Amino acid sequence: MLDLLITNGKVVTQIFTTVLDVGIKGEKIVVLAEPRILGEEAKRIIDASGLYVLPGAIDPHTHIQMQTSGLPKPGFDINSIAAAYGGTTTLIDFAPLISGKSVEETFGKRRAEAEGRLAIDYAFHAKFTSPSRDLIEEAGVAIEYGVPSFGEVNLDERRGTPADDAFLFALLQEIKDKGGIAGIHAENASLVGYFTNKLLRDGKRELRHVPESRPNMVEEEAVKRTIFLAEKTGAALYFFHLSSQEALKAVAEARDQGFPIYCETCPHYLAFNDEVYQREMDQAIQFVRFPPIRSAADQAALWQGVEDGTIDCIGTDHVSAFLSEKKALSEGKAFNEVPGGMGQIENRLTFMYSEGVAKGRISVNRLVELVSSNPAKVFGLYPQKGTISVGSDADIVLFDPKPVRKVTSRDLHMGLDYTVYEGWTFVGWPAMTIARGKVIIEDGRYVGSLGNGEFLKRRIGKEILFPRRRK
Amino acid sequence: MLDLLITNGKVVTQIFTTVLDVGIKGEKIVVLAEPRILGEEAKRIIDASGLYVLPGAIDPHTHIQMQTSGLPKPGFDINSIAAAYGGTTTLIDFAPLISGKSVEETFGKRRAEAEGRLAIDYAFHAKFTSPSRDLIEEAGVAIEYGVPSFGEVNLDERRGTPADDAFLFALLQEIKDKGGIAGIHAENASLVGYFTNKLLRDGKRELRHVPESRPNMVEEEAVKRTIFLAEKTGAALYFFHLSSQEALKAVAEARDQGFPIYCETCPHYLAFNDEVYQREMDQAIQFVRFPPIRSAADQAALWQGVEDGTIDCIGTDHVSAFLSEKKALSEGKAFNEVPGGMGQIENRLTFMYSEGVAKGRISVNRLVELVSSNPAKVFGLYPQKGTISVGSDADIVLFDPKPVRKVTSRDLHMGLDYTVYEGWTFVGWPAMTIARGKVIIEDGRYVGSLGNGEFLKRRIGKEILFPRRRK
Amino acid sequence: MLDLLITNGKVVTQIFTTVLDVGIKGEKIVVLAEPRILGEEAKRIIDASGLYVLPGAIDPHTHIQMQTSGLPKPGFDINSIAAAYGGTTTLIDFAPLISGKSVEETFGKRRAEAEGRLAIDYAFHAKFTSPSRDLIEEAGVAIEYGVPSFGEVNLDERRGTPADDAFLFALLQEIKDKGGIAGIHAENASLVGYFTNKLLRDGKRELRHVPESRPNMVEEEAVKRTIFLAEKTGAALYFFHLSSQEALKAVAEARDQGFPIYCETCPHYLAFNDEVYQREMDQAIQFVRFPPIRSAADQAALWQGVEDGTIDCIGTDHVSAFLSEKKALSEGKAFNEVPGGMGQIENRLTFMYSEGVAKGRISVNRLVELVSSNPAKVFGLYPQKGTISVGSDADIVLFDPKPVRKVTSRDLHMGLDYTVYEGWTFVGWPAMTIARGKVIIEDGRYVGSLGNGEFLKRRIGKEILFPRRRK
Amino acid sequence: MLDLLITNGKVVTQIFTTVLDVGIKGEKIVVLAEPRILGEEAKRIIDASGLYVLPGAIDPHTHIQMQTSGLPKPGFDINSIAAAYGGTTTLIDFAPLISGKSVEETFGKRRAEAEGRLAIDYAFHAKFTSPSRDLIEEAGVAIEYGVPSFGEVNLDERRGTPADDAFLFALLQEIKDKGGIAGIHAENASLVGYFTNKLLRDGKRELRHVPESRPNMVEEEAVKRTIFLAEKTGAALYFFHLSSQEALKAVAEARDQGFPIYCETCPHYLAFNDEVYQREMDQAIQFVRFPPIRSAADQAALWQGVEDGTIDCIGTDHVSAFLSEKKALSEGKAFNEVPGGMGQIENRLTFMYSEGVAKGRISVNRLVELVSSNPAKVFGLYPQKGTISVGSDADIVLFDPKPVRKVTSRDLHMGLDYTVYEGWTFVGWPAMTIARGKVIIEDGRYVGSLGNGEFLKRRIGKEILFPRRRK
């Protein structure tokens, strides 16, 4: 007897949309069938008529466990519950590689912090805390450990010592040999410094100068140089939070050459353009990100990439940032000292459905690809995660395309004092979230238990490291 | 209760390989499940342990109903049974468009010829019998009728009047508007004439001159010109029997630009190279094809395209040609008067498995893509055909990877007096063929009944006409 | 003692502009020197202070000796004098290759027609009168004869049988072997037919439909296909009267690949855009040309090519067409039956100076390159013609940059009843024309004698056939 | 009366080769004429029958005034005389830009060092001694001063602080605004460090590891990044001593896009390949250069670039390095501590004639272009230098193509204890060198007087900063 049967819903994968029964036993999907053809019995039967049955969303880019200031912040618990409310059933956060400490020790510590705290499954990208050469050998250990993705490999000077070409090249060779993928924060630190200092020397300290301080070429150069080095080694790359049209074009060209180059963009680059930095300080400060939000032309190019397949994944780059705290820390500061970060772990799927599917830009299959299947494939979770098929984890979202809801931070569950979507109207909303066979969000309430979320050991797939197209 | 349950087999699609139960009711697949999880009951249960469970293969390119000489030839009956022996459950043959006659009449006549004669499902490409302008309007009618693919649109002078640019352009505009796809035989008729006449003037009449009479540039020019015209209209193209590296490169570049350009190659271009034309007349005559079989470098490039995804489909270009007849007709003739054609409808899946999968060039998923999923997608049969999923037709091949068999024409079922693979050793062989729920090949015998094969009305998918990647 | 000394003028070549003395003895330039450094003596000394001293212009594209109707037309005499008035000292007209007749005979006949009739030197392009294969062997004879350029090789159906691919390819091979260059009229005949017939079927017969009947793609396809064939052979190409941006881009790309591909545009494509076909019939009929005058965007792209070096030469495509006659022949005719042709042999240099140099688009050195040096180089007349250097023919124009003149056909010398520049204001005008050492235009009068013009035997230079940049 | 008349020689420019009289008065060429047409009188008449009359060669890349060790070295005097022996009449050395000191002061100091010491004319590239931002403003002053070229802008870590992207970008913007050109030493310092350290860690200290320590990608990356930054600003670039095929391709592509990107290679990259580092230490040490001498494939690609025009200039990168001193300084050192540098200021023209012209690879006109006209044009000396035309400086080499000489360092005049061409046979040798009208080398002896050489103020030409081809 099945434990759970979802009947009559429109099952959506990257490939097809069909009305099917989904039968679950324990944590796994064990049956897909024509509705009620077998008269299956189940402990619980959910009628999903009129709902989409989607594979649980995967957020490949969050910064939860990163206490950058002394203030208490929402941690794995609140953030993972908020994610589940938004239809996300897996998240990938960061764990540090620290010079002089073993992977076993540092990852173990981070896992201990997560133990019993998460509502959904989780994994880590290994993050370099310094460009020390000994960490490069540690990269191989991390891959063995089940953490085969690295990043954000930092070409931006804001965050400690940026990786120089020698470090980056050595890392790419190591992960090529061992089967990993490098995640890149692509901004040329030297050029950022140049533009920033020029503005400051000219007395231009306001937030409206953020875009000028990091023009598109800052990202374009970093992307092209990283691709150059990656092509020499054959290593796989993942560009976090791609924001500009030139960078996107460079990625597309490398991909067309058959190199294993992947990219992500984030909802805020699709939702907004650089007009936001012209707003009042109170507003503008919400949008301080690196890379910054770009022109309307870039925004259009990113949507084009979302539509045409050039962009592989949507990640949130989520940071639990309180607006009040951001303001306090920015008192009297120049634009380059204002802390970045934006909280949106809860709104990725709804945003992409509402602005993407409901507005006719993408199909619901492409939605699944962007928020679930591709993150799973790129980062070595597929087909355990990222699809609805027999043998996969029963991570499922029942998504209702009908609700029309006005967004306000008070209705969200991230524990923050603002949302950049305040006042937006979203069409469609998750009706139920199921994580490894357990219903955890139902009737608008979290009904799971912390600790259900497990650490996922990963291995990057051969088809990601050696994509078919084209030498 | 299920009609048929295939249990314990390794189910293979374009995407995954998993041990699953496949439950069939009537003509459809209705369940996929963990083996025996539900204790399903079925009228017949087949244990497929150790076998691949593949979607039935689809041959997108056969010339069965083409009585070019007065001699009796194997027809739909024998050929469709031979196809089924080889694991093919759908074939696409040609039906004429004739100036002055209606689609209803000509297609009706061809369907009447097929009625009750086929062991497997079939469809037609519409074939122009002359470049008459009135036929272009008829193309729209054919699409409405369910025959939305055209070809071989003939840029080769051997076969009646070739399509000139005006005809081709007008056709492309029409099918763009109506939602069809043009299938192209890409050889520049004028250049073929030039090279052929030059050889004949020099007294070079032997078969060893076949490659010189149609050098690669003959195909390359035709491919590039057709792509040029297609790009101006946005129309979808399918290149039949692509044979040369330059042409393949041109197709790949157009595809990378986001144009709906697809291509096929045939087993003979992968199995052989132009050394065959240097053999004795008896041997060489088997390989007379247009385009001809090419150099070892082209052969390698085509395998590369099979591996890397540039080539979409494998078709046979099957013609029921008797070697004895070919010889009789060629007595005293120059190379350009020798009839072409080669029978191999039965060997496509086995050849591709043996030379592709068993030799480690491609995965079994890619095999399924090439011989089944992609033909189904390109020509508007997916997901009814081309995959194993709930709701699809129960067209299934149980493929045994273990047998090692020496090929001889006597063991085949095409009714011909030779095979170009005579003496080859193939690894892997179909163990059972199921067509729309009925077992038709079992224990090496045909156990179906003629007339099971039905005519398939088709409609080209939006994702084929407007592929995602890239403006 | 020198025969003629031009002192104090600004000598202009492709490379430099310097105040120099130019000393002439007989037909040749024998000295270049700092003004009066040697105290040279001369029979005549011309003070060219304030004037440009330019190499005589070369018109690489005229249709003078082409009596297409029964009416008397200005011939070599009037046209060559008009050319001289405009600063042109060499013209290249066409002589036929006729199936069954020898080069010696047909060229001899044409030379006899020219004997004693021209005011300036002349040469011929060999013109195919039919795509007969025997003419291809004759092409080698023509090259030997000193007529190594061919054209307009006709891909346009209006003018008798167009060259098919086989003919074109055979020709390219022959001239590659023998050292010639093919001049191409690049319009796809089949597509022209398609668009024209479509318009006529729709009852669209007026001149305003001329552009639609030959859209840019008609030229683009012909250019790309010809380049394809040329690249396969390595043969040199010259595109006559290029008119569209796409075609220009294709030429530039082939050139960048190092292929010997050259192109010309004509003043009318630079002066006008397709708005002219919207004018009243009386006006519009003046502009009927093949290819037609194109959009403002094409016009801008051609000027860009004139500025940036993509365009090699300016030719006139001159035809002695009377407006009255054009009108008479067009009575009641559809646009495709209106005779083309435009008379402008006299205005090339002045147009290019006025619109190019005076308006700051090009330097006077680039002007010399376009109207003199490049035509000389491409067609094998350099350095005998096309430059001012010691040893070159004393073909010289003293060009006065100061006059501002309103153009009217009555003031011109072509003997026609209209000019397309009627009412335009030109800045700059030739003050004196010297042909092989003889002053032939002076004080606004022709003071030479017919018969001074000689037939020029040519040989295409190695650097044209094998340009340096780039395999 | 002329001061000097060179009669009957074959005058060679970039464009033509003609037997002409060259008349000189004072320091200038004042007449070009048919031999003896005017019966010119002259104080001295030189019969150049059988000789080439070439414009004096220009060496755009020497490191003479660079006392890197305490030892006495040949200075401006000996080196400029050696240059003259080799047919070079102008050299461009380096003068420093020093933080905190004015251009007036530092350039003045260097000019004072040169005053009365040179046999031929000279100019300076401004060289940054540190990447201090204040020097960028000084760059504008240098341009005003007549020193509009900069370099070697150092992307290689061996030579003090390399320029980071911010410095490079700021510099490019400045020189774009002011009309200069940046000369680049293109090696990625960070990657050089990576490869070098890896070798040293592995105990690989011998000279045979030089190529591995700076593989082609080190140059390719630096070239591509610099081009990226230059394209963003529109600034002109000159790549010193280009050595690899990938870098050359990148330059060619940028050029084809119409960017003002130029490049040089040196005789040693054409003469040798990396086999030299496998020789005995005594031999191998002669060839230590940065970038190193590369593979035979790179050598072939560079010759191709010399032939096809991709390479603009040949420079020597001359350093007065004694072999004995190099050896002494390298005792017990690893490959990366061996001093680089190679003396060859005397052999550029002879090498290029012998290996280029005499072996049929290039024409004598292309030779002139590479060693004289292009250096003059790129660096703002044309047409004062770099050609033979009326008004140009009378810098002339009479070059005898007949001598066949075995090269030995004892016969050279550079004052060094070796030459890398020891034992080579050169065809052709300079017979006489004339500098600004004075014969300075004659009958194998230096007959000039030190101090004849003057400092040349330069201004980069508009056609270099804005090359014609192509947006």
Image (cartoon, coloured by chain):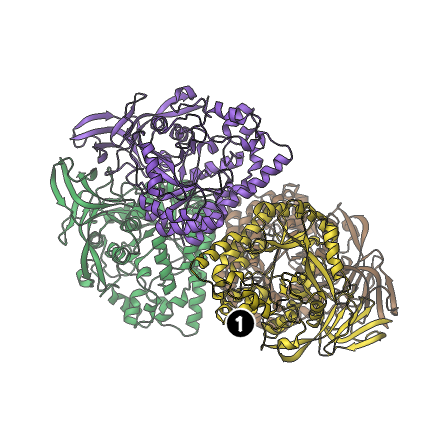
Chain colours: A brown, B yellow, C purple, D green
Residue C39 quadrant: top left
Q: Quadrant of the N terminus of chain C?
A: top left
> Total label count?
1
Local secondary structure at mark 1: helix
* Location of residue B80 in the rendering, given as x and y in whole percent from the top left corner: 71, 67
* Location of residue B132 in the rendering, given as x and y in whole percent from the top left corner: 63, 46
| In this picture, residue D281 sits left or right of residue B61 | left
User: Dot 1 surroundings within 10 Å: few (below 14), some, or many (20 or more)?
Assistant: some
* Location of residue D10 in the rendering, given as x and y in whole percent from the top left corner: 21, 46
Q: Which residue is mark 1?
A: B283
Residue B355 quadrant: bottom right
* Amino acid of disc 1: Gln
Q: Which residue is painted at 41% across and 66% down in the image?
A: D213
Residue B318 quadrant: bottom right
| In this picture, residue A48 sits left or right of residue D320 | right
| In this picture, residue C361 sits left or right of residue D315 | right
